[in-house]
Amino acid sequence: MSAVEPICIRLEPLQVEGVSLETDRHWISLAFDQLRPCLSCAVVNGGLGLANRWLNLIVDDDGHNGEHPNDTVALRCRRQGWQPQDTVAMMTAASVNSLRIRFAVIDNESVLVAVTTGLANARRAGDPAEYRQLQAVPAEVGTINMAIVTSATMTTGVMVEALMIATEAKAAVLQDFNIISTASPGIATGTGTDAQAIFSGRGRQVAFAGKHTVFGERLAQLTMTALGDSIGRKGNRVEPLEDNR
């Protein structure tokens, strides 16, 4: 079978400046024109660091053939000519067709949320866990993966607060859709293998990202719209979020 050429979509300048989207059936990539501070729970290069790419790697329902995620990501990066050490990577069995990106401008700074969604592994926080050892690696599939990218500057503390807001927004969407946990009768708050990453820019400083701030408000709206449209397979893959204030 011949290789599938990636589709490159450059998001509009001044809305998401310095960010480009590429996809094919094996992966989704948001590439940045410079290294950005990042905070994530990504399976590869997670934690706090610098990155110039978010990679959401599509694997089948059986995972990645027993390879360590670092090896799987490194192989894909070599094939594409990317630098694995600068790539924050997640994995998912969700379809590329579930990708939804919603973006907006807040006080002259851009922010976008990119989401892919699989719900076969829906869970409620506090459900009984199957894995009872600290070193256990869950093998279940069905994942909500999310990247948040802003042109604004964020301290580590503000990035943590923004991830908290996005997580609350995710739980609210699953409540609105009445997604039931696969391990209990409660409404799911996520899946068992969700991953999130936030990438800061070098623009105006964000002082706070909580619910009393316009940044927190719009970030939550972007998250809820992107995830809701991903679950419902609604709207275009990439869309601006209209200001509803």
Image: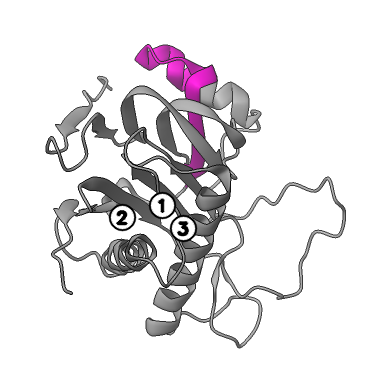
At label 1, which amino acid type do we have? Answer: Ala
Q: Left or right: 157 with respect to 22?
A: right
At label 3, which amino acid type do we have? Answer: Phe
Q: Which mark is residue 208?
A: 3
Residue 142 seen in the figure: no
Give the magenta-colored segment's residue range.
75-92
Q: Are marks 1 and 2 in contact (CB under 8 Å)?
A: yes
Q: CA distance from mark 3 to mark 2?
A: 31 Å
Give the answer, above or below, for where 17 lies relative to 213: above
Residue 219 image position (x, y, % from top left): 35, 61
Say what secondary structure mark 2 lies in.
Answer: helix
Residue 100 image position (x, y, % from top left): 27, 54
Q: Which residue is label 1 attached to? A: 94
Q: Are marks 1 and 3 in contact (CB under 8 Å)?
A: no
Q: Image point 65% across, 77% down: which residue?
A: 183
Q: Nearer the viewer, mark 1 or mark 3?
A: 3
Q: Image point 25% across, 46% down: which residue?
A: 110
How many numbered circles are shown? 3
